[in-house]
Image (spheres, rainbow, N blue to C red):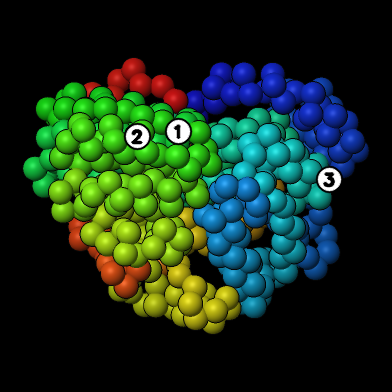
């Protein structure tokens, strides 16, 4: 069952109402009816009568998050090219229209409105930060359009107009805490970028810690794009926690880990468990700075499977032998394949048909089997913990016994009662 996400986006919608209203007026002839608050009644301008169908992608190709998001666009491009090479979707070739979110949530909302109401795309793939997703959510709900959001996030949300193909909390954050607890960790220091994902994630961490006898020795946040971590790292060193739980994102990660190393802190003495450090970030930060540090994901380039071997080989052949693959890239790639499989099951590009057909749709992705939960539009994911090696790759040191059913509202965890996004 879907819970309304609109209360959580009320403030955002007030701030961006003028921008979105102006765009909607320009696009009304091609998309939803102006003034119609019922998403189910919104009219689609998607044209499936020809040989091609348009889909959209919104990723930050500029700004502080470009280091993480531009590579996600590459994975979406490769997925679309492979779909077209295999005959398309329902016999139609896909035309990808890409937009730059420029690391700015309000711009994501503006570009989403353009894609849905002016370009008339059948689905949109993208978003990175939770701020960008929450900015786009009312656009997709009010237009009754579809967003495939491929990034891990803090949970506590579901929408009939969003499919969440990245991990939710019980598929990434909680397994990482379980792992640290099993390793004997009894105290943590929390650090993150200052927006909804890190703050909500750390609210979950604190509730988990209280229920499991783990002491929180400190908690700090820094603005997105910040490069000054001297004060925070000094506080971490003084706190002397068993480990650091890290939800810093984007190019701030480079400054954080270099300051961490310069302060003499090591993975052996005080390991960092990161939620947003994948292979691409390791390249930017430097393997020598990160060797031995921990990362929680559902996919690593080093996974051994026929599907992943092909995925990695195809990506390197398409974009260069020195490129790496990572969890956000793989999740975005899988999102295109899940959409294709759902459209083919529904035998339709219509939003309502896709929503009705989604439950139980399964693909074997590079990370393993992924199945859509028709009730909350999240997917099953295998949780994994990896350790950064000197070669710049991340190697798995633990995984869940099998794919974990998504529990975005943490109904299965009594200690999480009362946490809000």
Q: Going by the image, does 390 lie left or right of 137?
A: left
Q: Is residue 120 above or below residue 229?
A: below
Query: What kind of element bears circle 2?
Result: helix
Which residue appears at 31% of the width and 28% of the height? 219
Q: Is residue 15 above or below residue 345?
A: above
Which residue appears at 21% of the width and 53% of the height? 267
Is residue 180 at all visible to an observer of this figure? Answer: yes
Residue indicated by mark 2: 232
State which tag comes first along the sequence, 3 or 2.
3
- Residue 158: x %, y % from top left: 49, 33
Front label number (3 vs 1): 1
Residue indicated by mark 3: 118
Which residue appears at 62% of the width and 44% of the height? 103
Badge 1 crowding class, 10 Å Cα cut-off, few under 14, some 14 to 19, many 20 or more, is: some
CB under 8 Å between discs 1 and 2: yes
Task: Give the numbered dot on residue 203.
Answer: none
Q: 13 or 46: nearer the eye?
A: 13
**Residue 190 is drawn in which quadrant?**
top left
Query: What kind of element bears circle 3?
Result: helix
State which tag comes first along the sequence, 1 or 2.
1
Q: In which quarter of the image is the C terminus?
A: top left
Q: Going by the image, does 158 lie left or right of 124?
A: left
Q: CA separation, marks 3 and 2?
A: 45 Å
- Residue 211: x %, y % from top left: 17, 25
**Residue 282 is drawn in which quadrant?**
bottom left
């Amino acid at each position: 069952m879907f819970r309304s996400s609109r209360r959580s986006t009320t403030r955002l919608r007030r701030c961006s109402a003028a921008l979105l209203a102006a765009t909607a007026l320009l696009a009304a002839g091609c998309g939803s009816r102006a003034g119609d608050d019922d998403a189910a009644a919104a009219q689609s301008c998607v044209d499936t009568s020809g040989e091609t169908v348009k889909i959209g992608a919104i990723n930050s190709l500029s700004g502080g998050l470009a280091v993480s998001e531009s590579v996600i666009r590459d994975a979406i491009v490769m997925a679309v090219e492979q779909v077209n090479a295999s005959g398309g979707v329902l016999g139609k070739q896909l035309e990808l229209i890409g937009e730059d979110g420029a690391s700015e949530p309000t711009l994501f909302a503006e570009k989403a409105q353009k894609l849905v109401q002016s370009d008339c795309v059948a689905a949109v793939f993208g978003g990175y930060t939770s701020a960008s997703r929450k900015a786009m959510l009312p656009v997709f709900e009010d237009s009754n359009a579809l967003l495939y959001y491929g990034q891990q996030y803090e949970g506590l949300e579901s929408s009939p107009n969003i499919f969440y193909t990245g991990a939710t909390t019980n598929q990434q954050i909680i397994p990482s805490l379980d792992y640290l607890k099993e390793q004997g960790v009894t105290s943590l220091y929390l650090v993150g970028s200052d927006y909804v994902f890190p703050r909500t994630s750390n609210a979950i961490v604190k509730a988990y810690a209280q229920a499991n006898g783990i002491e929180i020795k400190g908690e700090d946040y820094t603005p997105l794009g910040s490069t000054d971590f001297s004060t925070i790292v000094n506080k971490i060193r003084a706190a002397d926690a068993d480990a650091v739980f890290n939800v810093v994102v984007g190019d701030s990660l480079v400054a954080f880990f270099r300051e961490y190393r310069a302060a003499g802190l090591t993975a052996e003495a005080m390991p960092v468990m990161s939620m947003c450090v994948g292979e691409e970030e390791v390249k930017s930060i430097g393997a020598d700075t990160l060797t031995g540090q921990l990362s929680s994901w559902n996919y690593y380039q080093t996974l051994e499977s026929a599907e992943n071997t092909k995925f990695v080989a195809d990506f390197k052949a398409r974009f260069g032998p020195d490129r790496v693959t990572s969890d956000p890239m793989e999740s975005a790639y899988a999102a295109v394949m899940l959409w294709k499989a759902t459209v083919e099951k529904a035998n339709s590009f219509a939003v309502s048909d896709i929503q009705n057909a989604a439950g139980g749709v399964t693909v074997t992705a590079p990370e393993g089997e992924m199945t859509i939960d028709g009730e909350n539009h999240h997917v099953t994911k295998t949780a994994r913990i990896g350790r950064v090696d000197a070669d710049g790759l991340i190697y798995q040191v633990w995984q869940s016994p099998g794919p974990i059913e998504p529990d975005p509202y943490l109904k299965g965890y009594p200690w999480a009662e009362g946490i809000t996004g």
